[in-house]
Image: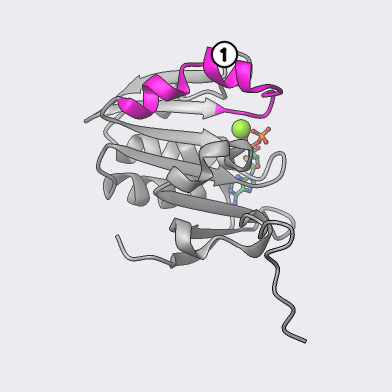
Amino acid sequence: MPAGIIGEYETSSAQETIALGKKLGSMLEPPLLVLLRGDLGTGKTTLTKGIVLGLGVKDEAEVSSPSFTLINEYFGRCKIYHVDLYRLETVRDLESIGLEDALRDRAVVIVEWGEKLEQLEEADLIVDIIDLGDDKRKLVVLTQESKPAQVKKRPKRGKRKNYS
Ligand SMILES: Nc1ncnc2c1ncn2[C@@H]1O[C@H](COP(=O)(O)OP(=O)(O)OP(=O)(O)O)[C@@H](O)[C@H]1O
Ligand SMILES: [Mg+2]
């Protein structure tokens, strides 16, 4: 998969975001880790519904926010794990949801609040969702190398070069 921004899209309704997710999902092959980043209520679960449909799950109603369970499992043309890290507070929590096992499985793993995931390095695909007001959303699909500066690891203290 080429590095960088794969695509930038704008949607004007939840339905359009689901349709976009469906197209994206139809192109995905496991094993794959997809991180979804974006503020509360921007549409991470909505996009997940689409991705899951694109992965062959018949009914999007199967997809619900795993806010309390932290992880849901669906079966389409491959195994799909849907993770929500919003309530994640400790690394122990992360261990308890079995994400490590999910990543080892031949599955597509979709993670809401992906910015909380320490294994950010391992993500194959990242989708940033930005609220443009009303029902408009911007969705930026990217691979790891083009992460925005704020999520890149800071250079270690002392190694920072002074270019001025
Ligand atoms: N263009 C759009 N794309 C996605 N959702 C939209 C759009 N316009 C309006 N919405 C609405 O925004 C809400 C998005 O909710 P959703 O649960 O998908 O967000 P979320 O990012 O998963 O939230 P949370 O941070 O709580 O997990 C839904 O009510 C949806 O109908
Ligand atoms: Mg959600």
Q: Image quadrant of ligand 2?
A: top right
Q: Nearer the viewer, residue 150 or 18?
A: 150
Q: Seen in the image, is 137 located left or right of residue 71? A: right
**Residue 50 at what x, y percent from top left?**
42, 40
The image quarter in which residue 105 lies: top left
Helix or strand or loop: what does disc 1 sit on?
A: loop
> Magenta part of the protein: which range?
84-104
Classify 6 as above or below 151: below
Instruction: Using the image, determine if residue 13 lies above or below residue 164.
Output: above
Is 80 on the left-hand or right-hand side of 7?
left
Q: Residue at x 58, y 28 (%)?
A: 84
Residue 101: x, y in percent?
A: 38, 20
Rendered location of residue 16, percent (x, y): 49, 52
Local crowd size for mark 1, using a 10 Å CA cut-off: few (<14), some (14–19), many (≥20): few
> Is 54 one of the magenta-colored residues?
no
Q: Is residue 10 visible?
A: yes
Residue at 52% in and 44% down: 120
As drawn, the residue found furthest toward the bottom would be: 164
Question: Which is nearer the eye, 141 or 121?
Answer: 121
| In magenta stretch: residue 94 | yes
Q: Position of residue 55 (x, y in %)?
A: 29, 37
Identify the image quadrant of residue 148.
bottom right
Q: Which residue is mark 1?
A: 69
Q: How is the image coloured?
A: one colour
Q: Is the CB of the residue bearing disc 1 within 8 angstroms of ligand 2? A: no
Give amino acid for label 1. Thr
- Toward which corner of the image does residue 123 lie, by quadrant? top left
